[in-house]
Amino acid sequence: METTKPPLTIAWFIWGLGALFYMVGFFHRVAPAVMTEELMSDFSIGAAALGNLSAFYFYSYVAMQIPTGILADTWGPRRLLTAGAFIAGAGTLLFAFSPGIVAAAAGRLLIGASVAVAFVCMLKLASNWFPSRMFAMVTGAALFSGIIGAVSAGPPLRLFMDHYDWRTIMIAAALFTWLIGLGIYVFARDWPCHKGYENLIEPDSTSSSISIPAIYNNIRQSLQSRNTLLLFIIPGGIVGCTLTFTGLWGVPYLSTHQGLTTAEASVATSSLLVAWAIGGPVFGWASDRLGKRKPLYILGCTMCIAGWSIIFFAPAISGVLLMTVLMITGFCSGCMVVSFAFAKESIPVALAGTVSGIINMGVMMGPMILQPVVGIVLDALWQEEMIYGARIYSQNAYRAGFSLMLAWAVLSLVLLFFTKETFCRQKHGTI
């Protein structure tokens, strides 16, 4: 029986089901930024405890990245995405009904562990269903889809919270997540041949089972590449700045020290995320067209450092200028998507899922570390000022905390110069 290559419409549909789940995961990453006052008041906690509560998502998310990459190479993305969606819904319900901080943290931990499968599985689906020349662009589109979820946790969530309790909103999010899981189980498939089409790449013959030696070998081979090691650290500085600011401390900082209302501050941080969503596909597409990974990555990282320096340390600036700098910084943060194509091309294609998990683990190390650390700094410099049960922090306290974010971004730029250019060509054979 003659088969044909899968149409892009089918490829986008199957990939899009994973993207819906990724959107939900990004929603949960950013939602605490809009709920800071409610969470601090409900659970009677300060900045350090709130930072830890938010970061519980990242603790389990990061821990799951390498297992997820290996499982994506062995079990396949369909089963992982389905299981992840149903577990994420359960974690969201636990968070919604939590009577105290311990149960809430457990819910965040469960959500982070389950949605951790989404991005790596999307990359695996992109490798299986799309031509290789589209990989970087599809990776950018993955970031775009996630940030749509993040934006929904900005002004739209704030609007809902003006009318509904945050717990009710979380219950609705849980039901929506379960619906996505059902859709993935029914419609998604790992390979084009499972829907009667010709596979674009040959499945790895060793990917039908898991063993401890095989897991160790996959990780060992991936880490033998210098690029893997460097790209484990580099994107964390960029994403750490972005998600620590938009995901937790940006709204209270802008509303306290830039003269914005809470609603206006959530619009400002969401605008940064929208720009990030646009920048991801643009940087991916441009690096594909240029045939190089390093130059655009270095340019984007440099612009990010400049933008964050203005946002954190410049004297009071007008609202228009502030919004412009936020959006430019967000757009340039999209350069981090180059990391995945860069790393994938640096190792044999059979290790694509494993190396994607390693890199995404590094990506999430940024906000995982920085969100609670910034909170610790804020609490250390708190001058005991409170409004409606929530702590208020000085501008100097925010600048001290944000300096740690900027330091990682500078380290990322330095390390980029030590990466080895792949010229957008996939490595074959052994490392």
Image (cartoon, grey):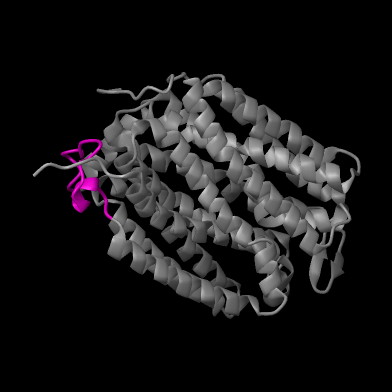
Q: Which residue is nearer to you in this view: 158 or 66?
A: 158
Residue drawn at x 70%, y 37% is 406
Q: Which residue is nearer to you in this view: 131 or 99?
A: 131
Is 319 displayed left or right of 173 in the figure?
A: right
Q: Please indicate, yes or no, whether residue 376 appears anywhere in the rendered image.
A: no
Residue drawn at x 62%, y 62% is 153
Q: Which residues are magenta?
A: 189-209
Q: Position of residue 282 (x, y in %)?
A: 56, 35
Q: Please indicate, yes or no, whether residue 53 appears anywhere in the rendered image.
A: yes
Q: Quadrant of the C terminus?
A: top left
**How many circles with numbers are drawn on the protein?**
0
User: Residue reaching furthest left?
Assistant: 1
Residue drawn at x 85%, y 68% is 386
Q: Position of residue 342 (x, y in %)?
A: 45, 29
Q: Quadrant of the N terminus?
A: top left
**Residue 4 part of the magenta-drawn span:** no
Rendered position, 106 above or below 338: below
Rendered position, 229 above or below 325: above
Is 288 displayed left or right of 300 in the figure?
A: left
Q: Which of the 4 quarters of the picture holds residue 385? A: bottom right
Q: Position of residue 16 (x, y in %)?
A: 41, 54
Q: Position of residue 31 (x, y in %)?
A: 62, 63
Is 173 displayed left or right of 4 in the figure?
A: right
Magenta stretch, main secondary structure, is loop
**Residue 204 part of the magenta-drawn span:** yes
Rendered position, 107 above or below 303: below
Q: Which of the 4 quarters of the picture holds residue 83? A: bottom left
Residue drawn at x 82%, y 44% is 322
